[in-house]
Amino acid sequence: DMDDEEKDGEEAKAIELNSEDSKKIAQNRKKKQELRRAAQRFNAQGYKSFSFIQSLGLLENAEDVTEICRFLRSTPGLDKKKIGELLGNSKPLPQKIMKHFINTFPFPTPGEKA
């Protein structure tokens, strides 16, 4: 059996873990809120929203096509039509994004079975 000192130590560890868990939960909640805000802004403004999304810390560089493609592929709630408008835009940045975005999909090479 544990003596009182050991029990106190175990309880302190449990409280510490719960505190860590609650910090992680709060961080996850904040990240989800930021992703929601980013999706709403993208859905309203398209690629003009990338500076705002960068200010949220979701993009390090608002012109880095790799980061932008990761954002487009992994952010829930993005309007597919807005993504299509972005990829169909003839300006230089959207064209770079479109070329990189296409390469994020695993297309089989000719003769390879899908």
Image (tube, rainbow, N blue to C red):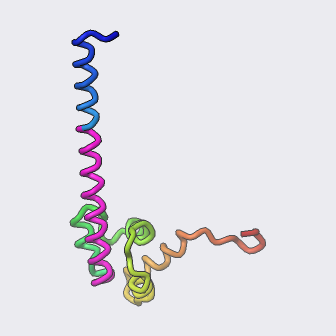
Residue 27 drawn at (x, y percent): 26, 51
Q: Quadrant of the N terminus?
A: top left
Seen from the viewer's position, the closer of residues 113 and 36 is 36
Looking at this rendering, what residue extends furthest in the front direction?
Answer: 1
Tag count: 0
Vertical relation: 107 (above or below) 3: below
Asked if 84 appears above or below 4 in the picture, the reply is below
Task: Please provide the residue range marked out in magenta.
Answer: 19-46
Q: Is residue 67 left or right of residue 54?
A: right
Residue 108: percent from left, percent from top: 68, 70
For the C terminus, which image quadrant? Answer: bottom right
Quarter of the image where one finds residue 42: bottom left
The picture places residue 20, in percent across and down from the top left corner, at 26, 39
The residue depicted at 23 percent of the width and 64 percent of the height is 56
Task: Locate residue 4: give its quadrant.
Answer: top left
Q: Looking at the image, which is closer to me, 61 or 45?
A: 45
Residue at 48% from the left image edge and 73% from the top image edge: 100
Residue 87: image location, x then y, percent: 44, 83
User: Which image quadrant is residue 105 in?
Assistant: bottom right
Main secondary structure along the magenta-highlighted residues: helix
| Residue at left offset 42%, top offset 86% | 81
In the image, residue 11 lies in the stretch drawn in magenta: no
